[in-house]
Image: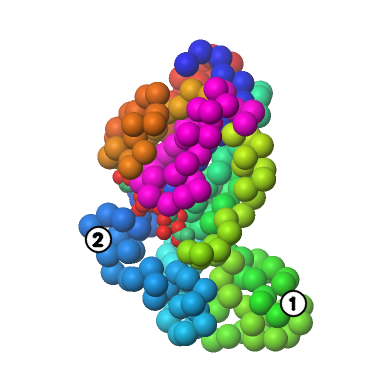
Amino acid sequence: MKNPRNIVILTGAGISAESGLETFRSSDGLWANHRVDDVATPEAFARDPALVLDFYDKRRAAAQKAMPNAAHDALARLDQAWPGDVLLVTQNVDDLHERAGAQRLCHMHGELMSAWCTSCDARHRWTGALGDRPACPTCRAPSLRPDIVWFGEMPYHLDMIDRALSQCDLFVSIGTSGAVYPAAGFVQSARHFGARTLELNLDPSQGSIFFHASRMGRATDLVPAWVDDLLAEV
Ligand code: OAD
């Protein structure tokens, strides 16, 4: 597509796969080894907080060891150089986009490096474990939980995302299976408002038919090449 101005980019676990972080739905992914109902719902946390906290403590530790890859770097480069609006919406809870330098970014499914106090509602940057039930720095209650959107909870930043989708002329989805709504429906919203749509993924996603164009391959190959093409038009 020539000369788009406003871009929305949706990313999923596939963009962090080559940084060594597990995806959810591959044959050896997180959901092959853990039941969603055991670790990713508010009911699971009420029933067995130790199990849930341990799951996210391990993921936080893994994310801290991982490094941004060429796809994260390319999107940060795009963010810094793009003269129009750009919004990078990630379903990922790792911090690899921001560590690569992206700024126009929102985490719709929360962040591993944030803890949320269910007593006083404060949020704190958190890099350590939560499994030992540390006190909330604000109210001292031992009520911190991962600041992660669990199944059955409302994703974050939906107003901002809806606004960006309604104003974008290019929507690009990278490294997501299209299995989880509302993110899986963004392609149809963007099309409804007239945007062109492009999918960059290893395999066709569940919503692949909704995209105007698809490129299949590894994120570290596809994303830098796509960003180079786009920035060559600026
Ligand atoms: P999935 O695990 O469902 O999908 C990952 C996608 O990335 C798949 O379509 C893979 O083909 C693709 N992929 C894998 N390696 C890749 C690579 N190197 N380059 C490009 N693509 C690659 O992960 P998500 O779609 O992110 O939500 O999952 C969506 C949500 O489901 C997550 O945010 C999480 C999960 O349950 C919550 O926990 C609320």
Task: Please name the residue that numbered disc 2 is placed on.
Answer: 28
User: Does the magenta-highlighted stretch encompass residue 195?
Assistant: no
Q: Which x, y percent locates residue 136?
A: 69, 80
Q: Do the residues under discs 1 and 2 have CB atoms within 8 angstroms?
A: no
Q: Which amino acid does label 2 sit on?
A: Asp
**How many numbered badges does the structure rendering display?**
2
Q: Can you say whether 121 is above or below 153 in the image?
A: below
Other-residue count near label 2 (Cα within 10 Å), few / some / many at <14 / 14–19 / ≥20: few
Q: Relative to the observer, which residue lies in front, 94 or 154? A: 154
- Name the side, left or right, on which 33 lies relative to 227: left
In the rendered structure, the answer to whether residue 82 lies left or right of residue 11 reads right
Q: Where is residue 114 in the image (x, y as percent from the top left)?
A: 61, 66
Q: What secondary structure is marked by label 2? A: loop
Nearer the observer, disc 1 or disc 2? 1
Q: Where is residue 200 in the image (x, y as percent from the top left)?
A: 38, 34
- The spot of residue 46 in percent (x, y) is 52, 82
In this view, the residue in front, 2 or 162, is 162
Label 1 CA crowd tier, 10 Å (few <14, some 14–19, many 20+): some
Which kind of residue does numbered mark 1 sit on? Cys
Which residue is disc 1 drawn over? 120
1 or 2: tag closer to the N-terminus? 2
- For this orientation, the residue located farthest to the front is 192
